[in-house]
Each structure stands twice: as structure tokens, then as C-alpha cells.
């Protein structure tokens, strides 16, 4: 049974709040009762697995023992006034993967205002390392992350957007507003002195006869007043000088307004209270958003970027303070609810589907209501009587498809369906939507209900040379086959491909000068050989001290394996870096280290299957299996059982640079190794660490394996993990004593692509 997920904060309520002093109860909310909204959503809507709540003062060792993942329902953590170093240290000490929901940045007019303190910056980079993808509130926060070099994120708004289970929530709100007058309105202000003018204007427009309540979220003094404390020195001073529009009111008016103030220490009690109003207007995003989740019309009056981006992402009716004329808020709310509500339902369905996919990347089961919202179906047990929703539709049709082409000019593929209606496909670059298309042209070679889709990426989306391309079904959020794929979309990609004979493609004009390497024009310098010598000596000595064995596996260049298909003017030379390195290793008389370069084995294996696909620079499943056999022989392990392969279309990195179809038939293993992941720091590529153990039915060696690797090693990790009691895989070329001390390996495998040998690694 899986360990539970730890959720930082509350489950959306402060237990025994009525018996707690105001300051104590308020502190438990995180110093803003609005936090209860998204904490409630995280606990009761987003997560479907076993979960517990833990305070921010958690003990890292205890949390590591009890839980498998830490979920952080985040607020506007990225703020110049915060230093969240203590939280960063605690989370880092757990060693657990993280799931961050709703991270926001706090700025008024420009993201340049966000100057992160060292502790908060460390927390952000910990999120990058430990999360598969970080769920962000909006586009402004995304810009802050990009400025700090963080790319693994997705803009999905706030979890509180998924509280109400009605898939037709927006349409129901619009219909209710059209039928009922606005007799009762709740007001959710900030009480900030700089918002006096706008909040006073909103209050005057609502009027005392319609004012149902004034919701207080912070500061502490406002909560105290809402609980009836207007006479303590702290409350009196706040009301007199720092309570915004309340401080400007006459004593009699202030007394009347204080009598309408409410504060909630339970999200459900808050939502229940809104059942008696017709609308909510507020400069507080969650005060207004909970009104919407309660099924009531709402208008967010935005005075800063954090409020604006969250309302924009979730599709809530929004007006900026600069664009709101006095006395126009209620009419504007009516207009915008009518225009936006139907779009809101489709938007929320798409956001829910994308959140479900994000949870899947973290091995987290979505809550049943979130999962149903992602499909647009009404979830049980909420039926027509509960919220007036439409009858549940028939089972949705099944869709499947394939992502075939991805470059800077064209993203394309095909989709098929169990019915005659083409599904829509959403394309993402690095987690951000760049467009949605409905498949149109028939694809009869696939089937009767099959169509092609094509999208030209907008110019503003093509900002990086290497991107993570995703194609998902818009309605469900499920990926198409071959999605996601990390690929180059650089303008000069075609110049990096060398065309050989019989359709073979090779790499050229790369930063490592692979063609110059294989032809002997680029060799290791004296200084580079000295660095290699220091590395090998340090590694060998450390391995001997630990009585560990070391295999240094060089993945041969495709140009060397299929030299006969190179252009006639490209002749493979023996005076190339790998041969220099082999000679160096022989001279050093290493005791614990052995170098393996399975060139001949891969050349001999070629006729059966393609050890390297024609259009890719990496080896195939079959090529990796051949290299593994050389590894097993070097380690003295029994050879693996004969593997079965089938032909499937897979990504080809060289083919994808030419602007056409990016996939080709390749030999693919029928049975995948059953290694089980027990730890993943979530880092992409360099720096990534995986901890694995052998799967059920395997008979591993009672030893610990450390494998340092690059992209070729991705094929080797699962089968190797089946052979050892515990395996740790780190994407890096260099190695140090600290890693050896941590992993305590009996066997060390270092895998490196041949073309990368011109960059010597370091030991220590």
C-alpha cells in the first residue's frame, strides 16, 4: 500500500476555531483566511489518494518516514517581502518529491517588482528540482519563473476553481442572474489604505439595503472586528487609522459596517453563507471566487497583477480598477457574467483535464470530482436535485491518435474516434498552450473515423531552440501517442543533418564536432587527456577503497557503427578521442575500472534489426540490448533472456530536424523491464536522480548499483535496475565522493556517448 500524501496546511477548516483566540486561529490559516479556499480544494477535490495534513513546522525526518510526497497548496510565495528559506530547508531535508499547486507571484504593476530573497529563490529552485511540473496561477508568475531559469511549469490557476462539482456551473450562474434581481450582495474588500477610493465606491454602489456582509480575510485586526472585537486597543487603532474605507467612515456608519463584517475559519461555512446572497463583488480574489464556486454571480475588481492573472486564468468576470467608473460595477458584472459564464465551463473543463494529467506525472490519483470535471460529466452522488445540473450525458466516445511531426513551422499528426465526430487537439510548448485545433481532413489509411490535424506554431511561441512538445485531447487532457517529445526546433536544424546512403542520417555541425572527431581532425588535447587521467585515477582509487567495481561504457557514435553509409568523403579514422581514451586507460593500469566500447558487437548485430534507426542519433531498443549484453559480460553477470521486439513508429531526432515527418519504424521491446521507482527529484536531463528497485518477479543481485549517464543511458536504466537490489541513476558525467558516500554502491557504471568524450569529466 502506498504511503499517504502530506498536504502542508489545513483541510480547509480550523478545528475548534470557536474556542481559539483570534490570533491563534488566524495564524493557523497562514495569516489569510483565503488560504482555506485552496487548501480545501486540494484536500477534498484535487487529491484522490490517501492524504494527511501537516503544519508548516513539520519535522522532515518524520515526514519522510510517514509520507511519499509533499503537496504544497501555494499562495503568492514569490514576494519580495518573504524569505522562505526555512520552508526550503525543511522540504529539502525530507528528500521527498513535491507537488506544488497554485504558485503565485505578488506584484502590483510589473513583475520587475518581484525581487526574491535568497531563501525564497532556493525554494523556487527546489520546486524545479523536485516537481515534475509546477502548477502556476497565471502568466505573470510564469514570467517570474522564466526569469529565474525555471521552465517545468504549467499555468492552471488555483485549485479553488474546482470546488463546485457542477460541470455547467457558469451556465447555471448566468441563468440564475438573468432570472433574479440583485437584492443581496456580499462585499470582499482588502481594507488597504491605497484602495480607499475604489472600495468606498463599490460599497456606495451596493448600498446598505443590499449589503449582506463584508468578508474579512486579513489583517488580524479585521478578523478580530468580524468576531465582535471593536474595542481592544489593537482593533480600535486599526479602525481609526489603517482600515481603509472603514477609517474614513463616520463613527455611526463604521459601527453599522462593522456589524456586517464576517470572517470564516471553514471554507464550507463560507460557501454556505454565500447561499443567501445573489452576488459577490470584491477586490479579494478568493472572496469573489468562492462566491462563484457557491453558484453566485461574481465580479473580481483587480488592483494588482496577482489578482488579475488568477481571474484571467480561471475565466472569472474581471475588471481592473483603472477601468471601473463609480456606480458601474453591478451593471458590468451582469454584462460580463452573461458573456463569460458559458466560456467558463469549457475553460474549467480544459484546466481540470490538464491538472489531471499533471497529477498523473506525479503518480497521484485525481479526486473523483476533479476527474469528472475533466470530462464534463456530472459526478455522483451530486444529481439534478443537488444543483440543478443537466442529466448526465452518455459515455464519451473513445479517441486515440499519434503525434507525427513537430518543428518550428508545423505540428501535425492524426486522431481517430469511436464515433464520427472529430476531436479537438491542444498543442503545448513547455507546458503552455499554443493553440487548439479540430482535426479535419480524413485519414482513410488509419480508419473510417480518422482525421489529420495541423497547427502552425505562432511566432511568439517559438522562443527556444529545444522544447517539450505535447499533443493532448482537449476534452480529456489525455496525451496522444508519441507525446510528449523533447525536440529541437532551431532555425538551423537542417544544417545539423548529414545525409548518407540508403536513407541513413548522421549528425554534423554540432557543438562537439562529431564529424571532425570520427575523421581524426578533432582529438583530445594534452590538457584534456590530463583531465581524463585525473578523473580515472580518482574514480579508480575511490572504487578500490570501497571494493566496488567500475565499468565505463562508451556508447559508440552512429557514424562509426554504420560507417559504410557515410558520404564517400567522410572516412572514419582510428585516431579519434575514444581510441585515445582506451589507450590512456590501458597505460594507467586501473585496478577497479574497466572500459567497454561495444562497437564491434553493434556492427555485427546490424543485419537483424537496426541497432540505430536510420533517422536517429541514438541507439534503438535493440541496440541498447546489444550494449547491455556487453555490460553483463564485463560484470560477469548471466546473459539476459532473449528479448522479443516488435516494430513501432518512434521519434527520430535527426529526421525531425528536416521539417517533415519526425517518426520512423523502430524495433521496440515487447516486454518492458519492471523496475520500480522509489525516488525521483523531478529534474529534467542533467542533474536528474532516480532511485529504483527490482520489480516483482525479478531475482536481483544483492548489491547496490550507481549509474551515471546521458541520454543513451535512459535505455539501460530499467533493465539494469532489475539486476540489482537497489539502483541509483544520475544524469551527469562527473562524480564525487559525496555521491559515493550517499549511494554506497557495489557496482558503478558510467555511460557516455562517444561524441561527448571531448568534454572531460571531474572527480570530486
Image (spheres, grey):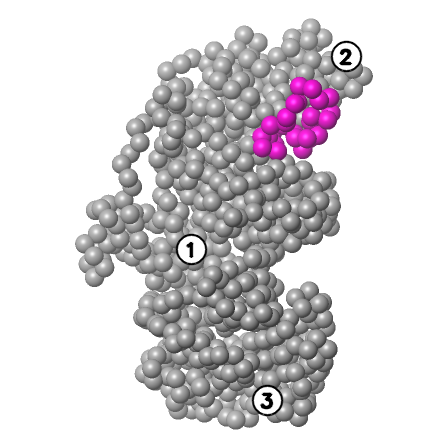
In the displayed structure, 434 sits above or below 21; it is below
In terms of depth relative to the viewer, which is nearer, 577 or 283? 577
| Circle nearer the N terminus (3, 2) | 2
In percent of the image, x 44 and y 40: which residue is there? 352
Query: Residue 33 lies in magenta, yes or no?
Result: yes
Q: Where does residue 54 sit, x and y in percent of width and height?
A: 64, 39
Crowding around mark 1 (Cα neighbors within 10 Å: few <14, some 14 to 19, many 20+) is many
Real-space CA distance between mark 3 and mark 1, rounded to the nearest whole angstrom = 41 Å
Q: Where does residue 560 sit, x and y in percent of width and height?
A: 46, 86
Q: SS of the residue at dot 3?
A: helix
Residue position for label 3: 582
Real-space CA distance between mark 1 and mark 2, rounded to the nearest whole angstrom = 58 Å
Quarter of the figure that contains the C terminus: bottom right
- What number is the disc on residue 470? 1
Provide the residue span drawn in magenta: 10-36
**Residue 486 appears in view:** no
Amino acid at each position: 500500500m502506498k504511503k499517504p500524501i502530506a498536504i502542508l496546511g489545513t483541510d480547509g477548516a480550523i478545528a475548534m476555531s470557536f474556542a481559539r483566540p483570534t490570533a491563534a486561529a488566524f495564524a493557523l490559516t497562514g495569516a489569510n483566511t483565503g488560504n482555506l479556499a485552496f487548501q480545501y480544494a486540494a484536500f477534498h477535490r484535487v487529491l484522490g489518494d490517501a492524504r494527511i495534513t501537516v503544519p508548516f513546522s513539520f519535522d522532515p525526518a518524520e515526514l519522510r518516514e510517514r509520507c511519499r510526497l509533499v503537496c504544497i497548496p501555494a499562495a503568492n510565495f514569490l514576494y519580495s517581502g518573504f524569505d522562505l528559506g526555512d520552508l526550503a530547508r525543511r522540504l529539502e531535508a525530507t528528500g521527498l518529491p513535491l507537488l506544488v499547486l497554485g504558485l503565485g507571484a505578488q506584484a502590483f504593476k510589473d513583475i520587475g517588482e518581484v525581487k526574491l530573497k535568497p531563501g525564497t529563490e532556493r525554494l523556487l529552485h527546489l520546486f524545479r528540482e523536485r516537481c515534475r511540473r509546477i502548477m502556476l496561477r497565471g502568466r505573470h508568475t510564469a514570467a517570474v519563473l522564466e526569469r529565474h531559469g525555471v521552465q517545468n511549469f504549467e499555468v492552471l490557476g488555483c485549485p479553488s476553481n474546482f470546488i463546485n462539482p457542477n460541470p455547467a456551473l457558469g451556465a447555471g450562474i448566468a441563468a440564475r442572474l438573468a432570472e433574479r434581481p440583485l437584492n443581496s450582495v456580499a462585499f470582499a474588500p482588502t481594507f488597504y489604505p491605497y484602495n480607499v477610493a475604489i472600495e468606498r465606491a463599490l460599497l456606495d454602489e451596493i448600498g446598505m439595503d443590499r449589503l449582506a456582509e463584508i468578508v474579512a480575510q486579513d489583517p488580524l485586526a479585521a478578523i478580530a472586528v468580524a468576531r465582535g472585537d471593536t474595542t481592544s486597543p489593537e482593533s480600535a487603532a486599526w479602525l481609526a487609522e489603517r482600515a481603509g474605507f472603514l477609517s474614513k467612515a463616520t463613527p455611526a456608519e463604521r459601527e453599522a459596517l462593522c456589524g456586517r463584517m464576517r470572517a470564516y475559519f471553514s471554507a464550507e461555512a463560507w460557501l454556505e453563507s454565500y447561499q443567501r446572497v445573489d452576488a459577490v463583488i470584491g477586490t479579494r480574489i478568493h472572496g469573489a471566487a468562492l462566491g462563484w464556486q457557491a453558484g453566485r454571480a461574481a465580479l473580481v475588481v483587480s488592483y494588482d497583477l496577482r489578482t488579475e492573472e488568477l481571474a484571467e486564468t480561471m475565466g472569472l468576470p474581471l475588471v481592473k480598477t483603472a477601468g471601473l467608473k463609480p456606480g458601474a460595477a453591478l451593471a458590468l458584472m451582469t454584462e460580463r457574467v452573461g458573456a463569460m459564464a458559458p466560456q467558463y465551463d469549457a475553460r474549467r473543463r480544459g484546466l481540470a483535464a490538464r491538472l489531471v494529467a499533471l497529477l498523473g506525472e506525479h503518480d497521484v490519483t485525481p479526486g473523483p470530482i476533479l476527474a469528472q470535471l475533466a470530462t464534463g460529466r456530472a459526478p455522483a452522488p451530486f444529481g439534478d436535485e443537488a444543483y440543478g445540473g443537466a442529466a448526465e450525458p452518455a459515455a464519451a466516445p473513445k479517441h486515440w491518435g499519434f503525434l507525427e511531426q513537430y518543428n518550428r513551422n508545423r505540428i501535425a499528426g492524426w486522431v481517430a474516434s469511436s464515433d464520427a465526430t472529430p476531436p479537438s487537439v491542444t498543442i503545448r510548448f513547455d507546458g503552455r498552450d499554443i493553440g487548439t485545433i479540430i482535426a479535419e481532413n480524413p485519414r482513410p489509411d488509419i480508419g473510417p473515423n480518422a482525421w489529420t490535424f495541423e497547427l502552425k506554431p505562432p511566432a511568439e511561441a517559438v522562443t527556444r531552440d529545444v522544447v517539450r512538445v505535447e499533443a493532448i485531447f482537449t476534452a480529456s487532457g489525455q496525451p496522444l501517442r508519441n507525446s510528449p517529445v523533447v525536440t529541437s526546433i532551431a532555425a538551423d536544424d537542417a544544417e545539423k543533418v548529414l545525409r548518407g546512403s540508403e536513407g541513413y542520417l548522421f549528425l554534423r555541425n554540432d557543438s562537439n564536432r562529431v564529424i571532425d572527431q570520427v575523421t581524426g581532425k578533432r582529438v583530445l588535447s594534452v590538457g584534456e587527456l590530463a583531465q581524463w587521467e585525473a578523473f580515472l585515477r580518482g574514480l579508480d582509487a575511490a572504487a578500490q577503497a570501497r571494493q566496488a567495481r567500475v565499468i565505463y561504457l562508451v556508447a559508440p557514435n552512429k557514424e562509426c557503427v554504420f560507417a559504410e553509409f557515410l558520404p564517400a568523403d567522410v572516412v572514419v579514422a582510428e585516431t579519434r578521442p575514444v581510441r585515445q581514451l582506451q589507450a590512456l586507460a590501458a597505460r594507467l593500469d586501473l585496478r577497479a575500472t574497466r572500459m567497454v566500447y561495444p562497437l564491434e558487437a553493434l556492427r555485427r548485430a546490424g543485419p537483424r534489426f537496426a541497432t540505430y534507426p536510420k533517422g536517429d542519433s541514438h541507439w534503438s531498443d535493440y541496440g541498447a540490448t546489444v550494449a547491455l549484453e556487453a555490460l553483463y559480460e564485463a560484470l560477469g553477470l548471466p546473459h539476459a533472456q532473449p528479448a522479443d521486439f516488435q516494430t513501432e513508429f518512434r521519434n527520430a531526432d535527426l529526421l525531425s530536424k528536416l521539417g517533415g515527418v519526425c517518426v520512423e519504424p523502430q524495433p521496440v521491446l515487447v516486454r518492458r523491464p519492471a523496475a520500480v521507482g522509489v525516488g525521483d527529484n523531478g529534474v529534467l536531463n542533467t542533474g536528474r536522480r532516480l532511485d529504483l528497485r527490482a520489480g516483482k518477479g525479478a531475482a536481483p543481485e544483492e548489491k547496490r548499483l550507481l549509474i551515471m549517464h546521458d541520454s543513451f543511458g535512459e535505455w539501460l536504466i530499467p533493465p539494469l535496475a532489475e539486476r540489482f537490489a537497489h539502483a541509483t541513476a544520475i544524469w551527469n558525467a562527473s562524480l564525487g565522493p559525496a555521491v559515493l558516500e550517499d549511494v554506497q554502491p557495489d557496482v558503478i557504471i558510467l555511460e557516455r556517448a562517444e561524441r561527448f568524450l571531448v568534454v572531460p569529466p571531474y572527480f570530486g
